[in-house]
Image: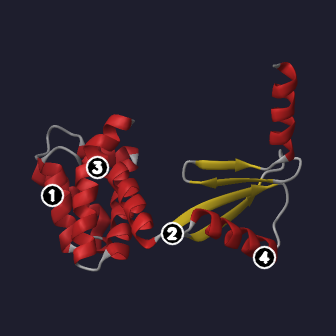
Amino acid sequence: MAELSTLARPYAKAAFEYALDHNQLTQWHQQLATAAAVVADERVGAVLTSPALTSAQQAQKLGEVCGDALSAQVKNFVGILAANKRLALLPQIHELFALYKANRERTVDVEVVSAFDLADGIRDRLAAALGRKLERQVNVQTSTDSNLLGGVVIKAGDLVIDGSVRGKLDKLAEAMNS
């Protein structure tokens, strides 16, 4: 998977810089998300990798499927990807673009998994505390997991904070066994 990210990085960087220069970060992010979702579909992927289609035809087919969701600039970008046989990288390009955008805007998406639904006040205090710790604007998404006994598991990018009772019991068992 690291190889795909390496291949996608220059394209994501170029798209990000173009969008930044033209003050279109949000639009490009949404349009790349659409194109990435379409390319990730197995049926569309099979058509786009067909050797019977030229790269221009592949870009045209993707543009047709996406319709008006893609601007002319993003369609041109897709054409460049097709010409370089890199359409399959669109999901990775979108992921990297989103990372560049979040770093630029100093935001982070945080997933909080708890045993029970969190009250709005607790969620807001947790978001404020995480914002101070991470020095970023925090966008919190909450979910519940009945397998947790209590506490929360917080995921922010590659940072995982396991404050669940199950996690603490696992650490205790590991310490006792070593």
Work out whether mark 4 precedes mark 1 in sequence or the reverse, and give the earlier one: 1
Work out whether mark 3 precedes mark 1 in sequence or the reverse, and give the earlier one: 3
Q: Within 10 Å of the Cα at label 2, are there few (<14), some (14-19), or many (20+) other Cα atoms?
A: some
The residue that mark 1 highlights is 79
Q: In 3D space, how far apart are the residues under numbered discs 4 and 3 (Cα atoms)?
A: 38 Å
Question: Picture coordinates of residue 117 (x, y %)?
Answer: 82, 64
Task: Look at discs 2 and 1 and give the one toward the viewer.
Answer: 2
Is 161 displayed left or right of 169 in the figure? left
Residue type (three-letter) at the residue carrying disc 4: Asp
Is 106 displayed left or right of 178 in the figure? left
**Helix, strand or loop for disc 1:** helix
The residue that mark 2 highlights is 107
Question: What residue is shown at x 28% (from left), y 65% (from top)?
Answer: 16
Q: Quadrant of residue 74?
A: bottom left
Residue type (three-letter) at the residue carrying disc 2: Thr
Q: On the rendered image, what quadrant is the N terminus found in?
A: top left
Question: What residue is shown at x 75% (from left), y 73% (from top)?
Answer: 125
The residue that mark 4 highlights is 120
Residue type (three-letter) at the residue carrying disc 3: Arg
Q: In 3D space, how far apart are the residues under numbered discs 4 and 2 (Cα atoms)?
A: 20 Å
**Helix, strand or loop for disc 4:** helix
Task: Look at discs 4 and 1 and give the one toward the viewer.
Answer: 4
Front-lying residue, 120 or 126: 126
